[in-house]
Amino acid sequence: MASFNSKTLVLFVLVGLLFLFWTAEAQSNQDCCLSYTRAALPLWAITGYTQQSSNEVCDVNAIIFHTKSGIRACTNPKAKWVKKLLLLLSKRLKKMSN
């Protein structure tokens, strides 16, 4: 069996840690919105939403609408139709809590 000196062992550990950090970053970027959906979504298709902030892990501010069919639609929070949907969803939630 080959013997490893301490420098070789340290090098293998550092390369392994670098690989782990690289794959963890790649995994987190998969969940980020990088562009916006242009088509307006109907209210009946939306089950909820989450907000993505550019000052966290992702580079883009977005509202992510979740649909009944399991689709995540990344939308521009400044778009009029997005603001309107958020207002309607908040009214729906308020109605449910009464």
Image (tube, helix red, strand yellow):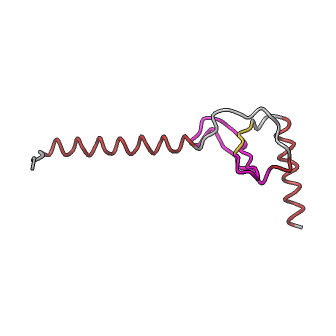
25 with respect to 92 (left or right): left
Q: Where residue 32 sits in the image (x, y, percent)?
A: 60, 41
At a point 87% along the width and 64% down the height, the residue shown is 96
At a point 60% along the width and 35% down the height, the residue shown is 59
Residue 41 sits in quarter: top right
Outermost residue on the front side: it is 69
Q: Where residue 27 sits in the image (x, y, percent)?
A: 50, 44
Residue 30 sits in quarter: top right
70 with respect to 57 (left or right): right
Numbered marks: total: 0
At a point 65% along the width and 42% down the height, the residue shown is 53
Q: Is residue 52 magenta?
A: yes
Q: Quadrant of the C terminus?
A: bottom right
The boundaries of the magenta stretch are 46-71
11 with respect to 88 (left or right): left
63 with respect to 22 (left or right): right
Q: Where residue 29 sits in the image (x, y, percent)?
A: 54, 40
Residue 77 sits in quarter: top right
Q: Where residue 39 sits in the image (x, y, percent)?
A: 80, 34
Above or below residue 95? Residue 64 is above
Q: Is residue 28 magenta?
A: no
At a point 16% along the width and 41% down the height, the residue shown is 7
Closer to the camera in the image, 1 or 7: 1
Outermost residue on the bottom side: it is 98
